[in-house]
Image (tube, rainbow, N blue to C red):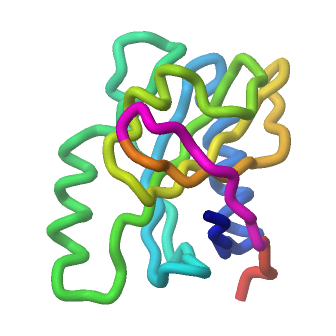
């Protein structure tokens, strides 16, 4: 299944900036959006990484809960998350596969080499331990 995700330049820059700022730890956050294909990201939410290990991420559950409540009754929903890989890898790790509980969620990964962000890669979760498919990212000019 190939899904297209639409993001703005500003959203990509925000994710990149947060990834570099968190280095050498992983950063993470939520993606808010609408649609199924394409999925349009309407907001990027920076979340605290509450993982104990600097080479892991865990979105603060309270942040996720608060946003689920905030979005109730709107057309927006949490469509996925983003996080960084300070080791420079751009593919989802085995740990990522363990964390991908919900199917059909967007996972954006920012690989970092020596603290410098490289191109954001997108993946579509197939669900817990079922792996990922590659997404098509469409980056548009910010309004």
Q: Quadrant of residue 86?
A: top right
Which image quadrant: the N terminus? bottom right
Where 99 falls versus 88 (above or below)? below
- Say if the magenta span includes residue 132: yes
Residue nearest the observer in this picture, 35 or 41: 35
- Residue 96 location, x and y as percent? 49, 30
Residue at image point 61% right, 32% down: 92
Q: Quadrant of residue 101?
A: top left
Which image quadrant: the C terminus? bottom right
- Residue 88 location, x and y as percent? 78, 23
Residue 45 seen in the figure: no
Where 56 falls versus 103 (above or below)? above
Q: Quadrant of residue 142?
A: bottom right
Where 96 falls versus 105 (above or below)? above
Image check: 28 left or right of 143?
Answer: left
- Residue 77 location, x and y as percent? 34, 73
Residue at image point 38% right, 53% down: 103
Image check: 77 left or right of 43?
Answer: left
Residue at image point 36% right, 81% down: 76
- Residue 11 location, x and y as percent? 65, 65
Residue at image point 24% right, 76% down: 71
Q: How many labels, in total?
A: 0
Query: The magenta stretch spans which residues?
Result: 128-138
User: Which residue appears farthest toward the top when viewing the image?
Assistant: 53
- Say if the magenta span includes residue 13: no
Image check: 140 left or right of 24?
Answer: right
């Amino acid at each position: 299944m190939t899904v297209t995700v639409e993001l703005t330049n500003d959203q990509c820059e925000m994710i990149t900036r947060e990834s570099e700022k968190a280095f050498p730890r992983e950063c993470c956050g939520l993606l808010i959006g609408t649609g199924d294909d394409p999925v349009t990201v309407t907001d990027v939410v920076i979340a605290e990484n509450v993982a104990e290990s600097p080479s892991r991420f865990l979105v603060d559950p309270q942040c996720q809960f608060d946003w689920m409540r905030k979005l109730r009754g709107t057309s927006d929903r949490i469509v996925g998350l983003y996080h960084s890989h300070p080791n420079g890898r751009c593919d989802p790790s085995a740990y990522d596969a363990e964390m991908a509980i919900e199917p059909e969620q967007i996972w954006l990964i920012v690989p970092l080499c020596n603290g410098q962000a490289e191109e954001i890669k997108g993946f579509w979760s197939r669900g817990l331990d079922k792996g990922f498919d590659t997404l098509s990212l469409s980056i548009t000019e910010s309004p």
